[in-house]
Image (spheres, rainbow, N blue to C red):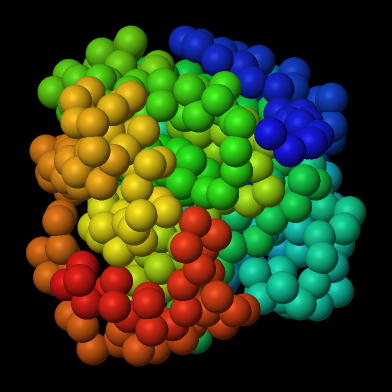
Amino acid sequence: MQNFNYHVPTKILFGKDKVADTAKEIKAHGSRVLLTYGGGSVKRIGLYDQVVKQLKENDLFFVELPGIQPNPRVTSVRDGVKLCRENNIDFILAIGGGSVIDASKAIAAAVNYEGDAWDFPMQKARVENPLPLGTVLTLAATGSEMNGNAVITNEETQEKRGMGSPLLVPKFSVLDPTYTFSVNQYHTAAGTVDIMSHIFENYFAPGEGTFVQDTIAESILKTCIKYGPIALEEPENYEARANLLWAGSLALNGLTLTGKKTGDWATHGIEHEVSAIYDLTHGAGLAIIHPVWMQYVLNEETAPKFAQMARNVWKVEEPDDRKAAEKGINAVRAFFNSLGMPATLSEAQIPGDHFDEMGKKACIFGKIGSFRRLDAEDVVAILKRAL
Ligand code: NZQ
Ligand code: ZN
């Protein structure tokens, strides 16, 4: 296990009605709020009214940025930056899923920066002096509520790129499982896949002696396998929604990466190229690509780790590592399909005519992945197998 620092300063307010403390938490950081949200789900579930009531009762000035889309666009980010500057905003409250939170982080980063907001995802600028932000999360998936990352899409260039800084970690996040009752089957399934995929990205990565991290990772996978199907069948099952919600935060708040130099993240890189062009739901893209990636990188060297997952998570009883690994990968694929996720790009109506471009763009900053290094040709080969 390698040396590490671990510091996640997000205060988590977990449970039913915890949203009642939102204004109190905001006041610790600011008084002029940009309230960001998506296409309307927060209004339908009553969250918007709750939050607005609190802001008014606590004399907190606020302006709104509605309409942030899934796969959030840099155009929304620019609109948000303008609103912040015009209104002297000193705090951002994001209410919604990962897309709303990610756009809010990108706004927070760009408000006190002279250049364009797209400079951050393009690695042309470092985040310095961002606005503080808090979140009320409504969908179990990305972990954005407890990390410093954001993923932004530029429609003009058809690019989807990540940015990140410890300075963008939310000050607080409210996680009330009842707000996730209304998430439909498709997004519940996609969110469950995303959580599992985050675990895979850090689990299938170089590093020795991380038994405790691996065991936590395996528990989070088991949590998704147990509660994902229950949440699909019984959307208002509090226990299932609560476990998925907390699993989502734990899967990507740095915990399972501690003691390792780096995760793999090739699958996410490849998926982002697909959703950049086709606006596919992130978790659906991962459901297609992650099992294909697993099969692609499987060799003598990587087989023992896949076999470990197969035995510890999928109860595979097979002494041979290579055979156990194959069974584990098949189990992942079958589980994603059982959630109703597509198994191939064709099933998601995605043709193969942009694969070369995707391969190049995925490797724009060099080879990707750490479990096995991949170049643009590998990415194209994976996409072809996923077709
Ligand atoms: O726009 P609204 O009306 O709010 O509807 C959303 C949206 O259509 C809906 N929804 C959210 N909460 C709901 C709800 N519908 C009913 N009831 C609720 N309680 O769900 C749809 C999807 O929302 P979105 O925010 O896009 O989903 P998710 O949380 O999965 O976020 C996906 C985005 O996060 C990025 C992805 O690439 C994608 O752009 N990621 C961010 C990461 C991070 N910041 O760490 C890591 C991830 O790997 C990922 O890349
Ligand atoms: Zn993800």
| Residue located 56% across and 82% down the image | 364
| Residue located 22% across and 77% down the image | 384
Question: Would residue 143 appear left or right of 130 to someone viewing this image?
Answer: left
Q: Hey, which quadrant is residue 338 in on the image?
A: top left
- Which corner quadrant holds the C terminus? bottom left
Q: Say which of 218 and 173 sits in front.
A: 218
Q: Hey, which quadrant is residue 227 in on the image?
A: top left
User: Is residue 328 something one can see in this rendering?
Assistant: no
Question: Would residue 353 appear left or right of 160 to someone viewing this image?
Answer: left
Q: In the rendered view, would you say 244 is above or below 125?
A: above
User: Where does the image place residue 291, in percent across and percent down from the top left?
Assistant: 26, 53
User: Where does the image place residue 344, in percent across and percent down from the top left?
Assistant: 15, 63
**Number of disc labels:** 0
User: Is residue 238 something one can see in this rendering?
Assistant: yes
User: Where does the image place residue 107, in percent across and percent down from the top left?
Assistant: 69, 58
| Residue located 23% across and 31% down the image | 319
Q: Say which of 276 and 58 sits in front.
A: 276
Q: In the rendered view, would you say 64 is above or below 158?
A: above
| Residue located 84% across and 32% down the image | 29
Q: Say which of 158 and 258 sits in front.
A: 258
User: Where does the image place residue 284, in percent across and percent down from the top left?
Assistant: 26, 53
Q: In the rendered view, would you say 350 is above or below 199?
A: below
Q: Say which of 226 and 233 sits in front.
A: 226
Question: Would residue 57 appear left or right of 343 to someone viewing this image?
Answer: right
- Which corner quadrant holds the N terminus? top right
Question: Would residue 331 appear left or right of 87 to someone viewing this image?
Answer: left
Q: In the rendered view, would you say 305 is above or below 278?
A: above
